Every structure is written in C-alpha cells, then in structure tokens.
Amino acid sequence: MNDSPLHQFGLQLLQSHKIDFKKNDKAFVNHFFAHLDEIEFLFNEIYGGHSKRNEAFDTLLSALILFYQQRPAIFKNKDAAKAKKQNWFLSSDITGMSLYVDRFAGNLKGVQEKLPYFKELGVNFLHLMPLFESPEGESDGGYAVSNFRKIDARFGSNEDLNSLIQEMNQQDMYVMLDIVFNHTSHQHEWAQKAKAGDTYYQDFFYCYNTQDIPNQFNESMPEILPESSPGNFTYIPECKKWVMTVFHHYQWDLNYSNPSVFVAMLEHVLHYANLGVDILRIDAPAFIWKQMGTSCQNLPQAHTLLRLLKQCVLVASPGMALLGEAIVAPNEIIKYFGTDEGIAKECDLAYNATQMALQWDALATGDTRVMLAAQHPIMQKPFGCTWLSYTRCHDDIGLGYDDEMIERAGFNAYQHRTYLKNYYAGWQEGSPAAGALFSVNPKTGDARISGSLASLCGLEKAIEWKSEIEIEHALRKIILMQAMTLFIGGIPMLFYGDELAYTNDYSYLQEADKSYDNRWMHRPIVHWDKNEKRNEVGSYENTIFTATKKMIALRGSLSIVSDLKNMNWMPPHNIHIAGFVRTHENKKLYCVFNYKNTASYLTWYAFKEQGERPSVLHDHWTGKDFKVGNDHEHFVLAPYSFAILETIK
Ligand code: GLC
C-alpha cells in the first residue's frame, strides 16, 4: 500500500467493508493492494474516457471485496494450498474429462454417483459442459445462457451442483465450468428488457435502428455459422432493432465497450469462483471486442479485458485459473497467455487447438511434416502457463494452422486441406473415416470437421466392413492420438465416450433442436451397459479403456511430463515419426509416435542429438529395454504405435 489517492480510496473501501487487516484478511489485503494499480491501469485503458467510468470502477472494487468476503472458507483454504504448490495446474497428475451432464449420467446427481468411474479411469478433473439455464431448443448445448446463476432444471438444482463439487473436493478432484462471456441468450433478462425498449439494457448489446451500421460491420466480419446461422445481425421485431448475433441468431453479443457489462460479467465470474471452480473456461474470448473495419476477433482490447479479469480474479479468488477458449490462428492463440509487459498475465491456460488439428493432419496423411513446420508459435508459450491438450472436444475440428505452414512442409495448401476434409468426411477413396463437414462456407471454401474420435479413426467403418486389420488400425490410431495428447504437456482433457471408443451417435438427427448442427454426432448419449463392456476382455471398449487408463497412470507417475517448459521437438529423421524429448533435472524422456500404417524406422542417431547420449532406453509403454544401437541401425515402431522412452543408462 502507498499514499496515492487510489490506495487511500482502496483503504477506505476496505475499512467500510470491515476487512480485518491484521488477522483473517491479511492475505487478501496484500493481494488487493498488489493488484490495485494494474486493475486501475487496465480499466482506464478501456473505460478511461467513459461517462460511467467512476461509478463502474467503484462497483468493480466493491465486488472484489464482497465476493472475497462471501468466498467459502474451504475454497479460501484451497487457494492457499494451491499457492504453496505454485502453478498447480502444470502438474502431470491432473487428467480431465469433458462431459455433458445429461448425456453422460442424466443429471448432476447421476454424475456424483459416477465419481468412482472417473477414479477407476484415473480422471481427477471434470469439465461439466454448460449447466446454467438455457432455453430448450435454442441453447447451443448450453452456450446461450438465460440465467447465469440458476442451474437448468434439466440438470438438477444449484444444491446438486454444490453437493457434487463438495464431494469432488473431498476426493481431491478439480472442476471446470464455463462462463459464456461473449453473449447471452435472447431470453436473458438483459435481452428481454432490451427487447421491451429499455435503453439501459439496449446498451448492453449492439443494437441498431437500421441496417447501415450492421452492413458496414459485415464488410470485414467473417461468418461463424454460415450454414445454420448466416450473417452477424438479427432483426428483432419487438424493439425494431438489428442486434449483433455473431453465433446463432438467439445468442446476442454483449457490448464490452459499456463498463457496466464488464462489471456485471465479472460478478458472475467471481460467483462461479465461489462455487468452487478450479479452472474457469472463458468461452469465445476472441470475440469480446468489436470494432468496425476489423474481423472483430482477437482485438487488442479483448486481451486488455482478459488481463483485467485475471487481475480481479487474483484478488478475490486467486486459486481459480483461467482457460481461454480461443480457437484461432496459431499466432493469435499464443497471445492469450499475454504479450509484452502482460506476458503470462492473461489466461493461465489455452486450448492447444493447433496441435490438436496437426495430429489429425498427421493421422490422415501418415506424414508429420506439417506438424513440425507449425510448432514455432506453439513453442512460444511462456513458463507458468500451460495448454489444455485434447484430441477431441464437443466442437468441430478446425484446420486452423496457416497455409504457409503447410507449404513449408512441401504441400500445396489448397490441395492439402481439400484432401483432409475429404478424408475425414469419408469421401476420399479408401478413407476409413466416418465424419462430416461442419459449417461449410461456399463463399470461402472453408469447412471444419465433425465426428467422434473412434469414427474419425476408422472404427465405425471398419466394423461395417468387418475388416480385422482396419479394426486393429482404428484401435491403434485412437490410442496413438490420445498418447500424444497425454504426453505432450499441459492438462489433457479427454472427451467423454472416447475412453470407450464411442462411434458417432446419429440420434441427434431425430431431434429438431439438434439436427441442424452435426456436432451432435460426436456428443453421444452414454449407455451404461456399453460402458460395462470395459470389463469384457477383447472388446473394443476394453481395449481402449484399459489403454487410456494405463496411459493416464503412466503420465501421473512421470513428473517429467509436468509442463515445466521442458519439451523440445526431436529433429526429423523419418517423415512418419514425430518425436519430442522432455528433460528435467538429470532425466530425459523421448516420446516418439508413428503416424504411418506400416512399421517405421528411426535411426538410433535421433536419440543422440540432445545432450548426453543414452546407451539404454526403457519404454514405459511396453516395459521393454532397448540398447541404443549404431547410427545406421534403427529403433522400429509398429504401425500407428508410440514409445515413451526414458534414458536409464
Ligand atoms: C464456443 C463453444 C461452442 C459454442 C460457441 C458459442 O466455441 O465451444 O460450442 O457454439 O462458443 O458459444
């Protein structure tokens, strides 16, 4: 604390809230003053000239104090324990699973009953897909929120969530929820009031009387859902206005140039922190700042707002980490960790969407050159931040890396992308994949890919073809993809169903509110009799469940896999094999992955290029030891296989 007017004002505010400076609240007071200047600086960057600046800033500071005061003791203690661990989320003993509560186990109570299942698998972190009230039929899987504080009756009650989180805490599990930060449902109270003509709430959104301004925006704004929801604005007859709706027409974009919007959403964020959220997934952060003449994505102001949010969280609920769901170009994703003086001061985690897509690229082509050519931006991640690593999630797969990366690997970008799309849609001659194209934009030729891990890896078709070899390859591909995700570093997030090789679920076609969105094909309804098959030796479910479980346990036992910025790619020697080496203290772990449908050979020299030369390597996956051979001899990797080799001599 210092003598500046800001600190004096802060002091008065703390006193008026009866903060205990000496004992209980000492740590909070330290955090408050440590971050106060930066909070004001960032707030002024965005709102300095706004007529509501002072009022909004005071409300913000009071909110930090109030939410801290309301924070349950159990989570304050957890904050302190996490602080002791330092960057607790870098550890290799966290493995997550993302799931729809209703599709997985009916409701929240059902999920609570299934906690032993996660334990059996080794999963200790759950991403519960959006749970808050969202209108049926217009919910975008819960990403159109009509009430940020009330659990949707479909999933149970607020008490059910509290009870689940409490139980998870007792079992040392972590939880992630979403804050749908960019937009609300058109049925949210704010939107309803705006529709009824309340100008205070119309200012919460982008509302225009005529199409003039929307047309100007549209000139530079891409369409996100060109098939199911073309355009970026929707006409609202009730208030006779054009409202910005970048995603579906029922999702109204919040206007963050209004400081009241930021403060109101911050309060929801702090409320979620107080529910016991360990990692908050910030949905679609790339979109939160709009400016005419730009793509309205990844703008510098969006980053400033995220940095501001992070500072506020550090004061009121320091144990809660932030995950930015920015599924954008590689050079843009990395900026969500912060840049320049804000480096490592923005999101703690970001989705490694680039690596995820690159693995799908390598799998379809049997060639790892694009993966390697695209690593530069990924490797820029600052120490102390980490990735959310994943093979599949509830969304489509976007081939978001740059054309230039594909070209550097020696391919024609257009042909390469066309091949990948045709391959995963299953149109390519001989392709074993059974996916579909999502959000095809005929104007730009862009398309993304839907399909479950197992179906994209070929299991669905292989079963149909009754082909033993294709089934074998599909199962190997599933394990290979998950292995790379688990060992590359960052928190691995499995998607429910993938641990049991669920193929596409086409039941969504029968549901009017889902049939327009083929992402539902890879969001299965779990059948617990199928899940029981994990115990039947020889079943696909058993093969995949057992392998996944083994990989998770192995990862947990190898602290070298923790994300200590200790990973380097091995120089390529065989285009079918991608490898990286992790080092820590005097340990070294080589992780090598063969993306080819035949055995691939790797010169032993590949293991001798990084510091001291090993003479014996132990493969943690197969349990075998290998004597490192001469440079003209080879380590052999079976089709679609991998090895996790530690130097033991
Ligand atoms: C995120 C979600 C996606 C949703 C979109 C709009 O990208 O992951 O499912 O459709 O945001 O909220």
Image (cartoon, rainbow, N blue to C red):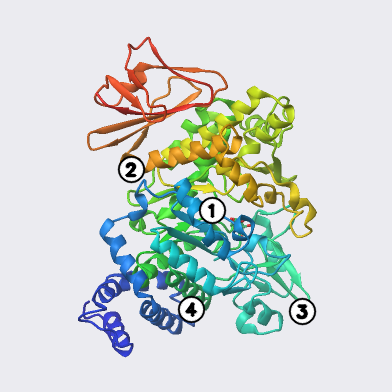
Q: Nearer the viewer, mark 4 or mark 3?
A: 3
Question: CA separation, marks 4 and 3?
Answer: 29 Å
Q: Residue furthest bottom?
A: 16
Residue 28 falls in image quadrant: bottom left
Q: Earlier in the sequence, mark 4 or mark 1?
A: 4
Circle 4 sits in a helix, a strand or a loop, which is it?
A: loop
Q: Is residue 169 left or right of residue 449?
A: left
Q: Is mark 1 within 8 Å of ligand 1?
A: no
Residue 414 falls in image quadrant: top right
Circle 3 sits in a helix, a strand or a loop, which is it?
A: loop
**Quadrant in which ligand 1 is drawn:** bottom right
Quadrant location of the C terminus? Answer: top left
Query: For mark 2, what is the residue?
Result: 565
Q: Residue at x 63, y 63 (%)?
A: 142
Question: CA separation, marks 1 and 3?
Answer: 38 Å
Q: Earlier in the sequence, mark 4 or mark 3?
A: 4
x and y, in percent, of residue 394 in the image: 60, 51
The numbered mark at residue 212 is none
Q: Is residue 641 visible to us here?
A: yes
Query: For mark 3, what is the residue?
Result: 238
Q: Earlier in the sequence, mark 4 or mark 2?
A: 4
The numbered mark at residue 98 is 1
Circle 2 sits in a helix, a strand or a loop, which is it?
A: loop
